[in-house]
Image (cartoon, rainbow, N blue to C red):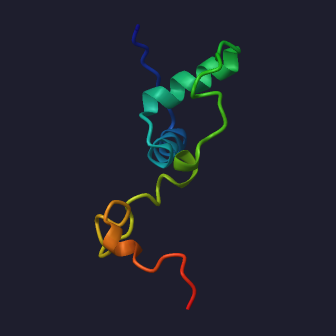
Amino acid sequence: MSTLSVKLPPPLDTALAQASARQHLSKSELVRRAVAAYLGTAQDSPSTRPPSALDLAGDLVGCFSGGPADLASNPRHLDGFGQQG
């Protein structure tokens, strides 16, 4: 892969950094995807598929603390689940 240096004005760099954090991708990956989309060379890859639930809510994953760490794997936490009254 070759390297390209690009100078960005501060507002564009800030927007790129925010999008990078929001999508959990590097700035380089976002720029590669944008250039590929602009040039029409994007294949059916993860960058051109609809976003997954994790992509859309990724900034929420792991943002809560204090709950049981093993909720999904410990059957004790599911006692009474689905039972009425």
Compared to 44, does 59 lie above or below?
A: below
Q: Viewer-proximal residue, 77 or 52?
A: 77
Question: Residue 32, percent across and down?
Answer: 52, 22
Count of numbered circles on the image: 0
Based on the displayed image, in which of its 4 quarters is residue 26 positioned?
A: top left
Q: Viewer-proximal residue, 7 or 59?
A: 59
Q: Could you tell whether 69 is left or right of 9 in the image? A: left
Seen at 28% across and 66% down, the residue is 69
Q: Viewer-proximal residue, 38 or 65?
A: 65
Question: Residue 82, percent across and down?
Answer: 54, 76
Q: Could you tell whether 21 is left or right of 52 in the image? A: left
Which quadrant would the C terminus be assigned to in this image? Answer: bottom right
Q: Residue furthest top?
A: 2
Question: Residue 66, percent across and down?
Answer: 29, 76
Seen at 58% across and 50% down, the residue is 56
Compared to 35, does 59 lie above or below?
A: below
Q: Viewer-proximal residue, 26 or 56?
A: 56
Seen at 68% across and 20% down, the residue is 38
Based on the displayed image, in which of its 4 quarters is residue 70 positioned?
A: bottom left
Q: Could you tell whether 77 is left or right of 35 in the image? A: left
Which quadrant would the N terminus be assigned to in this image? Answer: top left
